[in-house]
Image (tube, coloured by chain):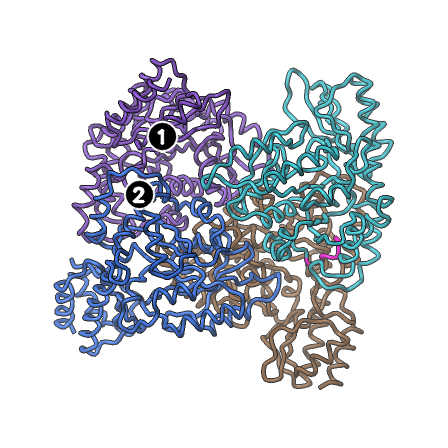
Chain colours: A cyan, B purple, C blue, D brown
Amino acid sequence: MIYFRSDYSQGAHPKVMAALEATNFEHTDGYAIDRHCERAAEMIKAIIGRPDASVHMMIGGTPCNVTVIAAALRPYETVIAARSGHCYFHETGGVEATGHRVTTVEPSDGKVTPEGIDFAMSEFQDEHTPKPAMVYVSQPTEIGTVYSKAELGALRAKCDEYGLMLYLDGARLAAALTCKSNDLTIWDIANLTDAFYIGGTKCGALFGEALVILNPKIDDHFRWMIKRQGGMLAKGRLIGVQFEALLEGGEDSLYFEIGRSENKMADRIRSALTGLGIEFFGSSPTNQVFPILPAKVVKELERDFFFYEWAQESDGMIPVRLVTGWGTTDEDVEALITRIKELI
Amino acid sequence: MIYFRSDYSQGAHPKVMAALEATNFEHTDGYAIDRHCERAAEMIKAIIGRPDASVHMMIGGTPCNVTVIAAALRPYETVIAARSGHCYFHETGGVEATGHRVTTVEPSDGKVTPEGIDFAMSEFQDEHTPKPAMVYVSQPTEIGTVYSKAELGALRAKCDEYGLMLYLDGARLAAALTCKSNDLTIWDIANLTDAFYIGGTKCGALFGEALVILNPKIDDHFRWMIKRQGGMLAKGRLIGVQFEALLEGGEDSLYFEIGRSENKMADRIRSALTGLGIEFFGSSPTNQVFPILPAKVVKELERDFFFYEWAQESDGMIPVRLVTGWGTTDEDVEALITRIKELI
Amino acid sequence: MIYFRSDYSQGAHPKVMAALEATNFEHTDGYAIDRHCERAAEMIKAIIGRPDASVHMMIGGTPCNVTVIAAALRPYETVIAARSGHCYFHETGGVEATGHRVTTVEPSDGKVTPEGIDFAMSEFQDEHTPKPAMVYVSQPTEIGTVYSKAELGALRAKCDEYGLMLYLDGARLAAALTCKSNDLTIWDIANLTDAFYIGGTKCGALFGEALVILNPKIDDHFRWMIKRQGGMLAKGRLIGVQFEALLEGGEDSLYFEIGRSENKMADRIRSALTGLGIEFFGSSPTNQVFPILPAKVVKELERDFFFYEWAQESDGMIPVRLVTGWGTTDEDVEALITRIKELI
Amino acid sequence: MIYFRSDYSQGAHPKVMAALEATNFEHTDGYAIDRHCERAAEMIKAIIGRPDASVHMMIGGTPCNVTVIAAALRPYETVIAARSGHCYFHETGGVEATGHRVTTVEPSDGKVTPEGIDFAMSEFQDEHTPKPAMVYVSQPTEIGTVYSKAELGALRAKCDEYGLMLYLDGARLAAALTCKSNDLTIWDIANLTDAFYIGGTKCGALFGEALVILNPKIDDHFRWMIKRQGGMLAKGRLIGVQFEALLEGGEDSLYFEIGRSENKMADRIRSALTGLGIEFFGSSPTNQVFPILPAKVVKELERDFFFYEWAQESDGMIPVRLVTGWGTTDEDVEALITRIKELI
């Protein structure tokens, strides 16, 4: 069975594992107050050019999203997100569990639009309606698409118009930053958002995300918020150690190398399938590929390959999701393309 | 200034006030454990033909909705509602404040449809998505429309298909039960839902709603839930006394009389405006009338009449909401119609 | 059966009912934005000498406490209260339902002490422990005792030392302000606390409390908080009308008259029982009397009088609670004293 | 600097790291549905002799406690814990963040007593007070003490008397199970509790705890609860792999070996300090040692050793906490003892 199931089906990139091995016998204080977390934070501040940022080592994407939103909002406030956005759709009500409504808008190619924000604001009236306070986006989106610099700039302008914060979920940020069509740098993100996170779990780490808070209001007693939300890791240094390994070297670092490798593998699949006349769901340029395949091809393919059916069969066709990870090999990709060619 | 602003702009119907006066010096125990609440509950069980029902005297509509939903759902569960539904749109995140997502669906003429429920269920996948457990509807809806017996029956069937509970918000139930086109009796409601409430605030009471729970699962330690949610009134008997006054006589009672009077006034307005070629937003047959008027007519009308603009001006027209209450008089209605005729 | 059960066993004082009657046919806008609520607020600001205060008409004591605490605290913060304090002991976890711990301290004669605050602060360490942000007290306390001006001043000083807010629950404030031993005026309270409420329900109103917020931080979007917590009354003016009736005339108003009458009745009971050598639980000088009576006297008394047993029998004795209300008469008190004399 | 700061100051036991290395390139499905988690669960069910148990791989102790409590309790219910209990004292209100009060009782030598439960139940009255539903204990306790089989049996009997569930936090279970005075086996725990967890983080793992649910009521849709509370790890197999490594061999496994080693080191410290006439805070027989040392000794010791001061100085003495971990060496212990001998 060859996995195109997700970018978290293997352990950590070998260089990340090596860093954990190398530091395993060290003694440090707990809860992410240690030299490794501190150094990883300094590296991140240098990479984004924001020495004023506050960096927190988070245990995973959902606790990161939920904790940021719970810290940023007053009880009567709501966060705007795409209906397909992770914090609404795929976190089992984690945000609502902290007492906040997520106000959904219809996405366009997976993305929140300025018009969507206008719509959400048009529903805000007075003390009978929750007050929007933040916009949640992810880069790349749930369907692998990426915001251009102009698009994120337009969202920032719209947020400023309404006094909203802008938060960016970077679970797969390595893939976004290194895909061919991307023009949005990590510097841009750091200057256009109030907070964002640099995803580790789906970009070569065992687990862990590096949260970057630019707006001090969100940072108020943030370590209390992490603990309250259950996201404080006793051996917190593990996240610091991994981000040191991932980010050493800045744009030449392992983190960017992993993104490039994932995208290269995905591009090969996209290119081959396009050549076969196959259509796609959305316009992902990153490590998630969403071909729409004949149902019987899908069923045959599932004998040897493990992946998600993205939606139900319709008119004999099924959209599927193929994801490449740090460990996806040329051989894996070749086998997949060959098999699809046989089946089409 | 003549009010068509809401059905809660005056105090209580004089007969309700008289009942409060008549019982004012009585001593009873607090928190709705007293002879009046008990008698009102018995009257309601007789009216709906369900001696097994559990009846609770609630302080208002929002606490009623929120407490029912919080009592009925497990933490990981969600309630399905129209995007325009009160529990989603107009309660400032009260449901989310108890930790539950409201899953919205697009309404048709203000109503939840079986297709809407299918759509919401299609979004439910596994442990990463909140599990739908209940459907919330209101009768009449936010725009005054009413579910027919067939429509509510179809929702019940759809709920049964998916194992969902069905809850009906009856804030303006008097108007729904007595409007000309209605074929859905209170017996039907009691047999098609898991819980519903008989609204008092907007139907002649000073305040208070009578919650009827048919599904014992929702009723578990419900008084604890009321207290936890801040909805337990010290002088709880006040609600019982009012419902005794409203419901004495069953279908000939003051409650139904108020509904008929409100609808009669609204029908006269609708009829006169229809005669003037005015169009309406939605098809309300109850005490809320939603004419779409030229903006300059609206502005002139606002000099003498107090009402809501329901949406923003579009193409020179503004949809407005005109509501009749227990105290709306022939003279009020005549004045309104006359003035609109002058302005059109 | 004669009631000494509570000060909420009857309806409203006749003058309050008269005010509700007199205004019943008026039309006003809803949700406590109307001339009566506005006027009541102005009256209160004049009485307390704080034109800068923000006044909100609240539906009851528990929603008042819970909404203030939820509005004042950040998610990781906790409120300090006596273990016997209403917001911890008697609100079924209403504060915790908004996500906040109540940190309890042992009371002295029902009161929070500066030493208690020191103890609570000694338990606060770092991000692993909730951060105390507010102290909750009630005047009078759950056992009817009152803080002197010096005592409340000492709590204020202690709060200032630690950067804590001070909130005072005045459910029975009329009784506290008018009891013989009181030296703490409503002016003092308004200058020593960050927020407090003037109780209506237990002081002659049908229901309703007037919340006074002195600290603007707590007042941020407070009407959103009221709605979110389910405490916004549609016919909000009802609370304004009642407080107009209660407070007209300032210190000569009905509110103070009711307090004096309740205390006078309670003092007569206390005096008579003291004369019989009966001991008391706590040192209440207000409208709650806590004699410790022989169990068999209690059981006999319960044939004709309705009251709470305050704790379980111990050594043949039972502490009971006798409460006087606005409608307690000389005859009621005489009958009680006579019967106890017969039984002792 | 030699660390006696905590049992989470180093990475994982080398055998655990080796297991992570050995499985690093494997592809598995995410979210703890994989062969390793499945096998670890089977091993645990065999060790405890309860094939009917449900086992969940949890990311940490606080998410484990909070998720169990939130899953087990209805909204109006409360959990009873020692005031020093981790879920009350050291989780920054994590339980309250899910809407539940923690009802505290005074511990005896760190332990909840049957009398404590009686006290908590005596405070439960009616719908105005939260209903106790569960008792939380930890083995060992916060101060390292252990419940005997008779003591845990007595708590179970008391829980049964009141219809309460019993939950045991086993963050340091390895140390408890292997200390000299222990007579409470893991079989006993599995038969006396409704749920408990086998701690990994503080017993040799990088992170992760294995939650064992014996009462099916708690297990309802538990994976939904894990996700909602933010505790679902994408690469969930990491926890399974670690517990396979820790538990292979049952009572001869690495888990028990680590416990024995930690206790042996702690016993040497205790024995040496006892010989010096030093007194202790509590009677811990496990890997936490709480000597009460002269303040000046503490300050000198802190030059070379890193540990917690457990409480503030009193009469010139400071109670400190010394913790041994899987990596604590004979040399570390020898150095500590030698230095204390010099300083005393």
Q: Which mark is residue B57?
A: 2
Decide if residue B119 is in sight here.
yes
How far from the left and from the top, in percent, is residue A42?
78, 55
Is residue B236 rendered magenta in the image? no
The residue lying at 77 percent from left, 32 percent from top is A286
Q: Nearer the viewer, residue C21 or A170?
A: C21
The quarter of the picture where residue C84 lies is bottom left
Find the distance from the CA under tag 1 to the CA under tag 2: 39 Å
Callouts 1 and 2 in the same chain: yes
Q: Is residue B118 left or right of residue D201?
A: left
Quarter of the rendering occupied by the N terminus of chain A:
top right
Q: Earlier in the sequence, mark 1 or mark 2?
A: 2
The C terminus of chain A: image quadrant: top right
Q: Secondary structure at mark 1?
A: loop
Q: Which residues are magenta?
A: A234-240
Q: Vertical placement of B80 versus A294: above or below?
A: below
What amino acid is found at the position of numbered circle 1 in the picture? Arg
Q: Between residues D51 and C114, which one lies in front from this camera angle?
A: C114
Q: Residue A102: percent from the left, percent from the top?
A: 56, 39
Q: Position of residue D314 (x, y in %)?
A: 59, 81
Task: Look at label 2 and name its amino acid.
Answer: Met
Circle number at residue C17: none
Name the residue rendered at 38%, 60% in the picture. Answer: C169
Provide the residue designation for mark 1: B303
Q: Chain of mark 2?
A: B
Asked if marks 1 and 2 touch (Cβ < 8 Å), the reply is: no
Above or below, D272 relative to A79: below
